[in-house]
Amino acid sequence: MINTRSFGNEMKRLGFDFYTGVPCSFLKNLINYAINECEYVGAANEGDAVAIASGAYLGGKKPVVLMQNSGLSNAVSPLVSLNYPFRIPVLGFVSWRGQPGYPDEPQHELMGQITTKILDSMQVKWMYLSTDMRTAKRQLLLAMRYIEKDNPFFFVVRKGTFEQEPLQKQLRPFNYPRISHASKAENEFPARQEALRIINGWKDGKTIQLATTGLTGRQLYEIEDASNNLYMVGSMGCVSSLGLGLALSKPDFDIVVIDGDGSLLMRMGNLATIGYYHPPNMIHILLDNNAHDSTGGQQTVSHNVSFVDMASACGYANSLYLRSLDDLDACLQKWKNKKGLTFAHLQISTRNEDPPRRPAVKPHEVKERLASFLNRGHLEAEGAES
């Protein structure tokens, strides 16, 4: 068995001090170490964890993702359509429940047979984590080489790999949210492009804009392509998780997450995670047209969901109904001045201007220039302090 604390300290020495994931009994001792000694974000599901880690990576962290192999399927979407095209590396630990030849629960049988095959199919480099400490340290150095080349790397962890690490008592104050209602005027249902122009108008040298996949990212690109924009091209539903990881790792930047109703509905569990970890430098804007616009306008069920009440219940400090572009403009002005985790819901129309073109800049180029923008801002802030 590996001494969990020694292994964790070695990872910390290598720069891995930001963890996120979903618990597994095989990994509980490493998770306990991460909670006790590092920054740990408990995710609603494994796909959200991968996206949170990806956001933390953009913010300069070396993130670690922890998951049971039953949840590896939840992580497939971001691993193949976020991490792969954007070339975002993460270090992963996935348990090997259902290992052939070892008794386990029936729900783990098939996944135990295909865990490593799934990793191979996703072109994710992996290795069985050794139970010998000296060997495990060498394995970490090998994983580092892959990560430094922008490739994710996963360790497959057998039962009994880590020695006991007791979980210390965790205390975190509850966030008391509030709802601020806009005027009772009728909704104006502006076009998405009009809303994006208002949002983009508040951008400055300390603002990062993350646009969800589909028409939102394409339209933002056409309004203004900028190095502090990121256009999601896949991993539907993960933009808010990406924003959370980035907001936590870059508290001196304003993180604007521009979401869509289809996207948010796909991964609503992350509202609870965002509300709990409560980054004050993040605003989550939902542009809701009750449709999957980029795939032909098929209706979503957003008209039956009270997103603002949900965000408030999950712990957002401010949860707002917006009725118009003026409301949106006023909301952004207030948030820029006072901050505080904010959720803003604006119903928009399905009408569009000319069909937007796809970004000419490649996803990994978007990532690289955003990283440069963030690093430049960090260096400027250090210079101002000195």
Image (cartoon, rainbow, N blue to C red):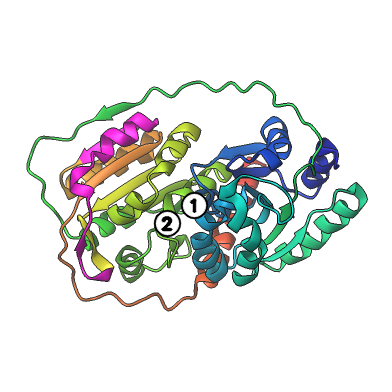
Asked whether 108 or 386 is in front, the reply is 108
Q: Residues within 10 Å of mark 2 (few under 14, many from 20)?
A: many
Query: Mark 2 near mark 1, Cβ–Cβ under 8 Å?
Result: yes
In the image, the segment drawn in magenta is: 295-321
Lateral position of residue 128 relative to residue 217, left or right: right
Magenta stretch contains residue 303: yes
In the picture of the structure, the residue carrying the numbered disc 1 is: 242
Lateral position of residue 287 relative to residue 96, left or right: left
In the picture of the structure, the residue carrying the numbered disc 2 is: 210
* Residue 156 % position (x, y): 72, 55
Q: Residue at x 57, y 55 (%)?
A: 72
Q: In the picture, which quadrant includes the C terminus?
A: top right
Instruction: Answer above or below: position of 244 versus 152.
Output: above
Q: CA distance from mark 2 to mark 1?
A: 8 Å
Q: In the picture, which quadrant includes the N terminus?
A: top right
Residue 301 visible: yes
* Residue 28 % position (x, y): 69, 37
Check the image and name the residue furthest to the left.
186
Quick one: label 2 or label 1, which is nearer the N terminus? Answer: 2
Asked whether 222 or 187 is in front, the reply is 187
* Residue 181 % position (x, y): 20, 32
Looking at numbered disc 2 in the image, what kind of residue is underneath it? Leu
* Residue 84 % position (x, y): 56, 69
Residue 62 visible: no
Say which quarter of the image contains residue 350. Answer: bottom left
Q: Residues within 10 Å of mark 1 (few under 14, many from 20)?
A: many
What number of labels is visible? 2
Looking at numbered disc 1 in the image, what kind of residue is underneath it? Leu
